[in-house]
Amino acid sequence: MILNDNEVINNLLNKDLKIIQRPDFFNFSLDSLLISDFVSLTRGTKKITDLGTGNGVIPLFLSQRTNAKITAFEIQEVSATLANKNIAINSLENQISIIHDDMNNWKDHLLNGSQDVVITNPPFFKYHGNENQLNDLDQLTYARHEITINLDSLIEVSSKLLKDRGYFAMVHRPDRLIDIIETMKKYNLSPKRLQFCHSKINKSAKILLIEGIKNGNTFLEILPPLITHDQNGSYSQEVLNLFENKNARA
């Protein structure tokens, strides 16, 4: 495999995986690990779609938990190329497929109601037309701001892809919670599990993890908060446990 001058290979935590990244593109964060561990996977999970995969880190993490086929959408060409390299360097071509396309074009690639699970780590920030709020690099803008897709479209696509009783899982910001729940209900995704993640025990939540079921019953479980760091700034034991390769497959 040929790497460009600005590409580097790193070990992906302690999971017997490697990842190729570029410093000028959005690199994987703890968010991706947390949502990959949070999402429900069962023996009946055969098909998973990741919307907005970036360099393919969520499919890599999921491959440690399941043998299900994973399809991942990525609109940016460089990120899609990196994702394909990451699939190849980990010899996961038979399990993971990267689609370089806008997720709004899902009908060109997948059937309606064909997926058991849809997972996403989407852009968090609304774009109001103020260019001052955008990043200098276009690729980072697309990763962080709702430019190519907004929350409503993302959840609508997810609902259409899911089979009845399929699972939807997303990591997002707590200040968008009301929008998220209202939009999920709009597209028949019943919120089922919610967990707030705090950087420290005395800090406000920084992110949330939410899971819903298509056409599910009305019942929402609020899980205990996840604290990602101790008072010294080191990762908490709960997070350190996620770093280990447990090889537990659904």
Image (spheres, grey):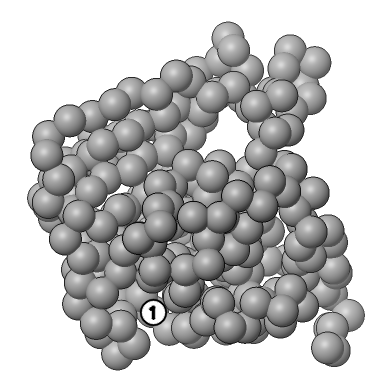
Q: Which picture quadrant has residue 43?
A: bottom left
Q: Residue furthest top?
A: 202
- Residue drawn at x 62%, y 83% is 93
Does residue 34 sit above or below 158 in this rendering?
above
Q: Considering depth in this image, is 210 or 216 the residue closer to the camera?
A: 216
Q: Quadrant of residue 19?
A: bottom right
Residue of label 1: 102
**Left-right relation of 240 to 111:** right
Q: Position of residue 2 (x, y in %)?
A: 85, 89
Nearer the observer, 236 or 231 = 236
Q: Quadrant of residue 147?
A: bottom left
- From the top left corner, tell me how far across and down residue 131 is, in percent: 46, 58
Q: Residues within 10 Å of mark 1 (few under 14, many from 20)?
A: some
Q: Is residue 226 above or below residue 147?
A: above
Residue 140: tell me if it is visible.
no
Q: How many marks?
A: 1
Residue at image point 30% right, 90% down: 108
Please say whether residue 2 is visible from this viewpoint: yes
Q: Secondary structure at mark 1?
A: loop
Query: With 15 as the anchor, is 124 left or right in this view?
Result: left
Q: From the viewer's perspective, is residue 111 above or below residue 12?
A: below
Image-based side of 81 in relation to 194, left or right: right
Q: Position of residue 80 (x, y in %)?
A: 58, 79
What amino acid type is highlighted by mark number 1?
A: Asp
What residue is drawn where x is 73% and y is 33%?
240
- Residue 90 in the figure: left or right of residue 26: right
Q: Residue at x 66, y 52 (%)?
A: 247
Quarter of the picture holding the N terminus: bottom right
Q: Residue furthest right?
A: 5
Q: Out of 22 and 161, give the one closest to the viewer.
A: 161
Estimate the x, y position of residue 203 in percent, counting from the top left.
Answer: 56, 15
